[in-house]
Amino acid sequence: MTNNRGSKALGLKELVAIAVGGMVGGGIFTILGISVGLIGFLTPIAIAIGGIVAGLAAYSYVKLGLYYRDEGATYAFVKLTYPKAKFPSAAIGWLVIFGYISTLAIYAYTFSSYAISGTDFANAIWVRKGIALGILLVFTLINIWSVNGMGKIEDIMVYTKLIILTIISVVLIQHRNINTQNFIHNLKSDFGSSSFISILIVASLTFVAYEGFQLVINAVNEMKRPEKDTPRAIYTAIIIVILLYVIIAVGALFSIPLDQMARDKEYALAAGAKNAIGSLGEYFVIIGAILATSSAISGTLFGSSRQMAEIAEDGFFPKKISKRSSNNIPAIAVISMAIMAGILIVVGGLRLLVEFGSITFLVVSLLMAIINHKIRKKTQSSSLITIMAIIGLGVGGILILYYEFTHKWEQMVAIIFVYIALTIGAWLYSKKRKFI
């Protein structure tokens, strides 16, 4: 494929913005309260480890992206590596789309949690779910009716939310309730009371907060210098996001009591900011969360619906999903993803959604690492790095399942059931359809 090197070609700064915007969605708002409830002051360490694993996973995406130069990214990598094997392509297609559906549900759920966090309905579960469904509907309609100006709107939301999150972190640290000495003491104390396995479990759960760097690969044919800018953009973005997440977590731990973050985990940052720095701080957090989740919902619906349409065009989803409107919008794919995300919101809670999303992208990234290791001579990849990625991602997936089995086995059964259903669906379509 040839690259578009015209005036609209993407440079390094634009690609970094795409990756950062894709990652900084509702992730940090979602995982903070859950993580603190599990390992307390060790949360920043777990978040950093999760970022390192994401960096290892990104290595294979970069290498495969530069080798194949296909906008289909994850799905295309499998299809092109195993051109005669239909089931692997169908399976990865179903996994990737389901992963995006689960993250859509997380973003919408987080949006609603923060939107009503300062009201009397903050703990009303069905009000929260109703608003989550509503915001999904809003962005579904936007994605169906028009894409004009969405790029500029996305850029504004991305950079605004980064500024707001940075301000929140600095303000929280300045208005801390504990000093540095006590923070270090609490950190050492939690090291003694928490096992290394617990830290790794939380690190695995945080992986969903780094999902989104893959969006850079989808823009491979719009880049000015793909060979140089693809790795630079993805690795730079991951480093920026790790630092941002860690600073936010440290700021929250300095100023917000642990029991409050664990209790109000769906909107921990907003509730804590109100107590630490007043209503203005709470409003700042809410605005940041709403911007972050809104841009994530819009961007995920936009990109993943087109990937779903491509997979349907190859015959691995119902053919109707591949249909596009007169202005090239895959409306049926957009609606299908929104409906399925809505179902997840209705039947699942925040923790279940996070675990679904993390496991899905751990599995998908693991498969990408395995594929890259298999063709490492062609992609000129390091055997050591691909093996480290395979081990890290594999251990992460196993640890989440272990945690579910030992703490809430019903959810583990639900997760396994969903993946069995996805595998059966992919297998049936791989037998029924042929590549077009």
Image (cartoon, rainbow, N blue to C red):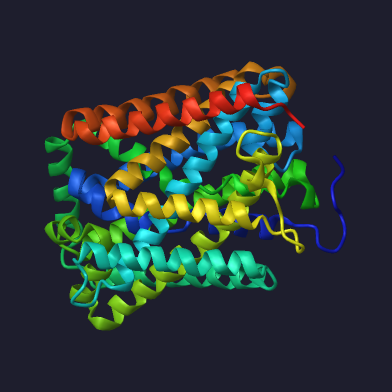
Provide residue 69's location: percent of width, then percent of height. 76, 38
Residue drawn at the location 58% of the way across and 69% of the way down: 142
Provide residue 58's location: percent of width, then percent of height. 56, 37
In the image, is 44 to the left or to the right of 66? left
Q: In the displayed structure, would residue 63 be above or below residue 149?
A: above
Q: Quadrant of the N terminus?
A: top right
In the image, is 99 to the left or to the right of 270? right
In the image, is 97 to the left or to the right of 379? left
Q: In the displayed structure, would residue 361 be above or below residue 141?
A: above
Provide residue 287's location: percent of width, then percent of height. 39, 75
> What is the tally of numbered marks visible in this picture?
0
Q: Quadrant of the C terminus?
A: top right
| Residue placed most toward the observer, 214 or 416 | 416
| Residue placed most toward the observer, 178 or 295 | 295
Provide residue 366's location: percent of width, then percent of height. 50, 27
Residue drawn at the location 31% of the way across and 62% of the way down: 129
Taking the image as drawn, is residue 240 in sight? no
The quarter of the picture where residue 70 lies is top right
The quarter of the picture where residue 288 lies is bottom left
| Residue placed most toward the observer, 219 or 274 | 219
